[in-house]
Image: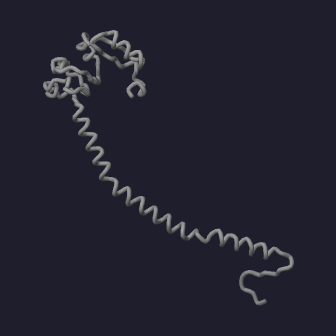
Amino acid sequence: YLVDYGTADKITILNRTLDHAMDLADCYQVNAGSLDALDQYLQEADIVITATSSSAPFILAKQFEDRKPRLVIDLSVPSNVHKDVDACDWVQVVRVDELSRITDETLNTRAAEIPKARSIISQHLESFREWSERRRHAPMLNALKTTLFQLQQHPHIRVQLGNSNT
């Protein structure tokens, strides 16, 4: 999604082995780097997304001492971002369990709107039914109108519409 957003030149994939990072980066045509240079890349980053199988956090508060505002999205279980990062007011950390909670809240909010949407649909459906019922006889009335017009135009039939004394 980030590549599709047009930011490929600003994305860097890090891995423990540079070759593996380069293979993955080539697939998406983004930059690659080694996890050994994590501190340097964190200094340059505005947004950090971590998704590793590491059993221990490796992103620490001391890596954000420059007080540069950042968004850190941690998709790892267990978390790759140490709890001490939460104390850095300039770093917003969003963990996968929070994303799940946000998704659940969003779905609940949407679900709460369903009765309102159904009510709106019902109102419009009723209006459509009324309109459709009024239009039910329209083809017959149009045919009658056409026939009367044809009779009026016929040279052997004298039809006078409206009030007449004849």
The N terminus lies in quadrant: top left
Of 22 and 69, the residue lying toward us: 22
Q: Is residue 93 above or below residue 125?
A: above
In the displayed structure, does residue 46 sit left or right of residue 150?
left
Q: Is residue 132 above or below residue 47?
A: below
**Residue at position x 31%, y 50% from top?**
111
Of 146 and 91, the residue lying toward us: 146
In the displayed structure, does residue 9 sit left or right of residue 135?
left
**Residue at position x 30%, y 15% from top?**
14
Farthest residue toward the right? 156
In the displayed structure, does residue 107 sit left or right of residue 130?
left
In the displayed structure, does residue 104 sit left or right of residue 135?
left
The C terminus lies in quadrant: bottom right
- Quadrant of the image occupied by residue 21: top left
**Residue at position x 74%, y 73% from top?**
147
Residue 138: x and y in percent read 62, 69
**Residue at position x 55%, y 70% from top?**
134
> How many numbered discs?
0
- Quadrant of the image occupied by residue 117: bottom left
Residue 73: x and y in percent read 26, 28
Residue 72: x and y in percent read 25, 26
Of 23 and 62, the residue lying toward us: 23
Q: What color scheme is it?
A: one colour
Farthest residue toward the bottom? 165
Q: Is residue 165 above or below residue 29?
A: below
Of 61 and 13, the residue lying toward us: 13
Residue 22: x and y in percent read 36, 12
